[in-house]
Amino acid sequence: MAESTLALVKKAHQTLFTLHQFDVAEEFFSPQFIEHSPLVKQGLKGLKELIERRAGQFSYSLERAFSDGEYVVLHGLFEGLSEQPLVGFDLYRVVQGRIIEHWDMLVDQMPPNSSGHTQLDGVRHLNPEARRSESLERVLPFFQTVLIDQQYDKISLYTTGEGFIQHSSDIGDGAAAMEAFLVQAKASGNALNYHHLHRVVASGDFVFTHSEGDIGGRRAAFGELWRVEAGGVAELWDAIMPVPLDEEALHPYGIF
């Protein structure tokens, strides 16, 4: 079931965003489809308009994909969809063989960070020997203690220490670099405040968290992909997207 769900979403995504074909959308999407993307306001109708308006002008490159029950996470790059290339995550929910819900967290592509890592490089495939339950046991306490409770001095307890690979454009590798960044952000009035963890999607050594909060009082959506290795968080990719104050009111289903 997981493989068929993943295959369905990958095919749908390629058909829409690489081949720019919308006439077969009913093959992939439920009539009750709910769209949460701030880029699309009217479900399938809005999605069709977006593709028809930008057909031939944009492309998509997939770097990572995995599924967990009803959910599928894609991590990749859109070019031509906006003025700047967009990097981040698409989260799909599939029910009875059709896509019924979609969220995205997309940010501008940025230069490599101080450690030379980009927003997309790094390990691309799941470790087939890794256990989902063990990965969750590493990531969820980290998320609660470090991000929600803001105990930044505990980062090294949950990661692989100075071997921790960071793909954020603002932070270099290592637990100490992440701690220093978060401490400085809080001291300057731009703390990353996590309020609610909406969804967790996990498979093997990959765990994706979809949450909301604020950065210095400015509402934000957080998409983070964690890779677990040797008993700790070994790698992190993120897409942290500002949410305009009126976005929930303007969007028929809200963005979360």
Image (cartoon, helix red, strand yellow):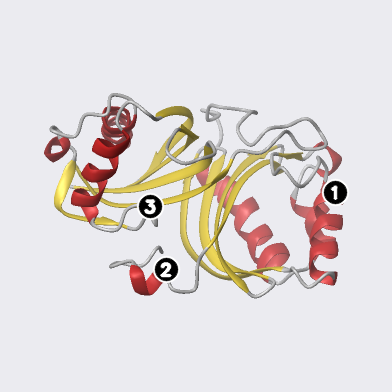
- Above or below residue 22? Residue 182 is below
Q: Which residue is found at the position 78% from the left and 30% from the top?
A: 116
Q: Is residue 175 left or right of residue 93?
A: right
Q: Which three-letter amino acid code belongs to the residue tagged 3? A: Leu
The circle on residue 188 is none
Residue 5 place in picture, x, y as percent: 28, 37
Distance from label 2 to label 1 (Cα)? Answer: 33 Å
Residue 114 place in picture, x, y as percent: 82, 37
| Pick the front one: 212 or 1 | 212
Q: Which residue is found at the position 30% from the left and 36% from the top?
A: 9
Q: Nearer the viewer, mark 1 or mark 3?
A: 3
Residue bearing the label numbered 3: 39
Q: Which three-letter amino acid code belongs to the residue tagged 2? A: Glu
| Pick the front one: 65 or 103 | 103
Residue bearing the label numbered 2: 247
Categorize mark 1 by other alpha carbons within 10 Å: few (<14), some (14-19), many (20+).
some
Where's the N terminus, which quadrant? top left
The circle on residue 177 is 1
Q: Is residue 112 left or right of residue 62?
A: right
Q: Which three-letter amino acid code belongs to the residue tagged 1? A: Ala
- On the question of residue 144 being in view, the answer is yes
As helix, strand or loop, the secondary structure at mark 1 comes to helix
Question: So how many labels did they put on this image?
Answer: 3
